[in-house]
Amino acid sequence: MSVDGAAQRDFEVALGPDNVISDPPRLRSYECDGLTGYRVVPALVLLPRTAEEVAAAVRVCAAHDVPFVARGAGTGLSGGALPVADGVVISLQRLRRVLEVDPVDQRAVLEPGVTNLDITKAAAPHGLYYAPDPSSQQVCTIGGNVAENSGGAHCLKYGFTTNHVLALEVVLASGEVVTLGGDSAEQLGPDLRGVFLGSEGTVGIATKITVRLLRTPETVRTLLADFPSVAAAGEVVSDVIAAGIVPAAVEMMDTLAIEAAEEAVHAGYTRGVPAALVVELDGPVEECAAQFDRVREICERHGCTRLHIAGDAEERAAIWRGRKSAFAAVGRISPDYFVQDGVVPRTRLAEVLGRIADMGADEGLRVANVFHAGDGNLHPLVLYDAAAGETERAEALSGRIAELCVELGGSLSGEHGIGTDKACSMPKMFGEVDLAVMARVRSAFDPAGLCNPGKLLPTPRLCGERPGPYRPHPLEQAGVIERL
């Protein structure tokens, strides 16, 4: 399983020599995704321009037994687009056309390289928008959103990518092109669209994506509230949901995250406060106004020390600029960091944040927190200095935080995926039989294991884990018999 001279020539014939990168300095541009702690230089990078060229590249991989990793903008935070040293990266950045916007049926058809924000820009003239909005929405692509089942700040009310994708044109590991899903969310037969969404590039490459669009809300109301403690902010979140109010978004940031964001974009957050909440409501004017008053009352009851209500679109944009800049802004207060992505029940937010702080103190490392509080999706950022030899401690702490979320009744990931980062922790959440079933589903799409190998599921190479209970017979491995 490697790229030899014959394979490289076939890639150059399929795509053109100028669309095959083999120059070592250029290859290093693709050595990692947003999780920069893991780096692997691929043997080649392929730059297809069309879906047909993607399929042609995958067929060459299948013919030469070459592993491949699909890559969008490289903004993933779990090592999901980490290359394979003896394989190729198939970049989808050139497939960036909006193929159709249908305002009647409220849907859009896109190539995988279209950025998340550009979907809404294309839909806006029709009074429509695309709801999932990851923090990196200006640069992250819909193909990567599909692979990771991304969410974003507004997933509390509107759901994740899987709730907004109707159909997918997919290139399988054999090079065959198939369509999963259809014109509506409900289809007869097995939900293969659902299998593909969130599979982290391990069962194929999406080359055309049909998404549903929503009507732009009649009104939007946004507030920024400071609190004397993380516990007080967490109680507000629980009380808002208990009151029957489902905000479009509820985001929380702690002192370190606020410090970093203010240093970067000067959004008007209060430096030094223990916690801040961003709460946004949208919908009909009268309903939104009534619910907004109720949210404000809940904030004040829990000791809110400052409450700023966005007076216009510019102020609302500033509030969101502070929140959405936080991940990148942390680079201003730490040379290196790991971003974690666990989920806990909302009622345990204060508990888990307290334990994370204690764990960080034990390791002598700082942890910044910025996350989707409304659905308990945490994003702890473990800050460290690789030059000071702190990498191993930071990586271990990041893994323990993910597993702590499972211990408290949550999950390893809400939207960033498992990737390389958390594959070894999967047995903490799933049993041996569960993992074996997942592996067999994956192998049904990709029997040779060429499609983004080493991601998502624990393997002996990665973790020293024993495979699941299914053991293929030697005759089956030799192709003499077939398992039914």
Image (cartoon, rainbow, N blue to C red):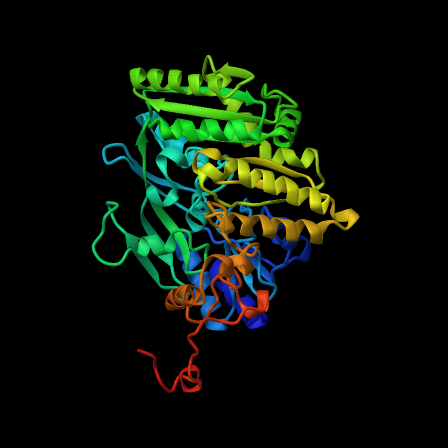
Residue 432 x, y percent position in the rendering: 45, 67
- Identify the residue shown where x is 41% and y is 27%: 239
Residue 381 x, y percent position in the rendering: 61, 41
* Quadrant of image for the C terminus: bottom left
Residue 347 x, y percent position in the rendering: 45, 37
- Relative to 231, residue 392 above or below: below
- Relative to 48, residue 84 above or below: below
- The residue sitting at the left extreme is 188
- Identify the residue shown where x is 42% and y is 33%: 154
Residue 20 x, y percent position in the rendering: 56, 58
Q: Is residue 340 left or right of residue 176?
A: right
- Relative to 169, residue 156 above or below: above
- Relative to 323, residue 294 above or below: above
* Quadrant of image for the N terminus: bottom right
Camera-nearest residue between 376 and 132: 376
Q: Would you say residue 17 is visible in this rendering?
A: no
- Identify the residue shown where x is 34% and y is 79%: 483
Number of residue marks: 0
- The residue sitting at the top extreme is 311
Q: Would you say residue 425 is visible in this rendering?
A: yes
Camera-nearest residue between 139 and 190: 190
Q: Quadrant of residue 195?
A: bottom left
